[in-house]
Image (cartoon, rainbow, N blue to C red):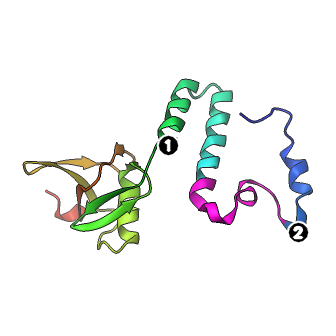
Amino acid sequence: MRDTNFDEKADLQTAPDGDHGGIDSLVPNSLGSEFAQALRKVEAAEGEIAEGKADLDEAIHELDELEHSHSVQIIVNTKQVEMPHNRANGLAIKERAIAVGVNIKLDFVLFAELGDGRQEVVKDNQVIHLHSEQRFEAIDNDDHS
């Protein structure tokens, strides 16, 4: 948790070389934006907990899951896609697939293949656990019937 006596404005004013401080200036470039995003989420969660909008036990559980997360290879429309974590929402899966050249768009409907020809829709905001070689199909919303 953040120290309640922490004065971020004072820290911002004394940052060297025109650096305005903040999370991005504290994170070494080698750690990348994923680490900075995680720090932002932690700070946001701390704020919600302080305001009574979030449950501390739930926040600890989510952080523990993230800490034990690992990358996983999945398949989207027959192409291998490496996901940086073994938990992702539907939108993150589509974004990553597009980044590696899968010919889909963000408004496509994403399906998780369950086996025996069965599929289940994965909504953009729905977080799921991923496993190695898990198969997904993303199709144009207009083609879905």
Report whether residue 106 is seen: no
Residue 73 in the figure: left or right of residue 56: left
Residue toward you, 72 or 97: 72
Spot occupied by residue 35 in the image (x, y as percentages of width and height): 60, 54
Q: Residue at x 50, y 43 (%)?
A: 66
Query: Which quadrant of the figure has residue 143?
Result: bottom left
* Mark 2 neighbour density, 10 Å: few (under 14) some (14–19) many (20 or more): few
* Mark 1 neighbour density, 10 Å: few (under 14) some (14–19) many (20 or more): some
Q: Residue at x 52, y 42 (%)?
A: 67
The disc at residue 17 is 2
Residue toward you, 89 or 140: 89
Q: Residue at x 67, y 65 (%)?
A: 29
Spot occupied by residue 23 in the image (x, y as percentages of width and height): 72, 54
Q: Is residue 59 above or below residue 33?
A: above
- Asked if the stretch drawn in magenta spans residue 10, the answer is no
Q: Is residue 55 above or below residue 85?
A: above
Residues under labels 2 and 1: Cα distance? 34 Å
Q: Amino acid at mark 2?
A: Asp
- Residue lying at the far left of the rendered structure: 116
Residue toward you, 47 or 130: 130
Residue 127 in the figure: left or right of residue 37: left
Q: Residue under circle 1?
A: 66
Query: Which quadrant of the figure has residue 102?
Result: bottom left
2 or 1: tag closer to the N-terminus: 2
Spot occupied by residue 131 in the image (x, y as percentages of width and height): 30, 49
Q: Residue at x 75, y 36 (%)?
A: 2
Q: Which residues are magenta?
A: 19-36
Report whether residue 61 is seen: yes
Select label 2 or label 1 by which is in front: 1
Q: Amino acid at mark 1?
A: Leu
Quadrant of image for the N terminus: top right
